[in-house]
Amino acid sequence: MSDRSDELLRTLIGELAVHDQLTETARLMNEALKRGDAVAVKRLSGRYDEFTMQVEQLEEKRQDASAALVKTAAIVGRPLNLSTVILAVAPEKRPSFEEVRIQLKRSMGELAKINTCNQILLEEALHAISQTMAIVAKPDTKLSAYRKSGRIAQSDGVRRSFINQTA
């Protein structure tokens, strides 16, 4: 059981390292979104996807190792999560597993917060683009100085500003 628990701990530590890189990438993407740096967002998005794939691979490896460890320890009737796995490892190894579990939980929580913020920033940017496109596609003819053809609209001889039109 020692080899399995050591392998699982190494997998968890690897997963934590990738989660930390993923969180840092999300943070950098957040800063790029706030700056409006589309090139950086694109680059970071690719990097984010790579880290996400690594996490998925490590997660599968973790699930397999966890299932084998719990089966060996004959723990039944409990969900296969890290808390259950910790019960299956030798008592002297439990503090190491518990520390990694706490760090993973912290990292995942931080990543979720940053991702929520990034999602909001992206939705706001898409909304602004949509509104801009709507204005360009169908300008308000009362306030538009140009016709759809791009030529200046004929005026009645009196130059009006926006303020004069509304007053």
Image (spheres, rainbow, N blue to C red):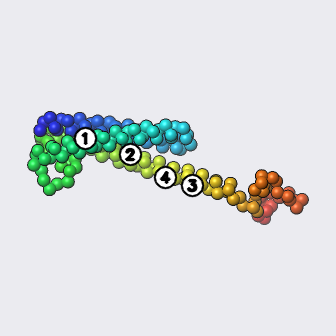
Q: Callout 3: helix, strand or loop?
A: helix
Q: Callout 1: helix, strand or loop?
A: helix
Give the numbered dot on residue 120. Answer: 4
> Looking at numbered disc 4 in the image, what kind of residue is underneath it?
Ile
Write down the residue under mark 1.
Answer: 61
Residue displayed at 10% across by 46% down = 73
Tag 3 near tag 2, CB within 8 Å? no
Tag 2 near tag 1, CB within 8 Å? no
Q: Residue furthest right?
A: 157
Q: Callout 4: helix, strand or loop?
A: helix
Write down the residue under mark 2.
Answer: 111
Earlier residue among tags 4 and 2: 2
Residue displayed at 45% across by 39% down = 46
Front position in the image: 138 or 115: 138
Front position in the image: 69 or 163: 69
> Looking at numbered disc 1 in the image, what kind of residue is underneath it?
Lys
Earlier residue among tags 3 and 4: 4
Q: Quadrant of the N terminus?
A: top left
Write down the residue under mark 3.
Answer: 127
Earlier residue among tags 3 and 2: 2
Front position in the image: 99 or 130: 130
Instruction: For residue 25, say whether it is visible.
Output: no
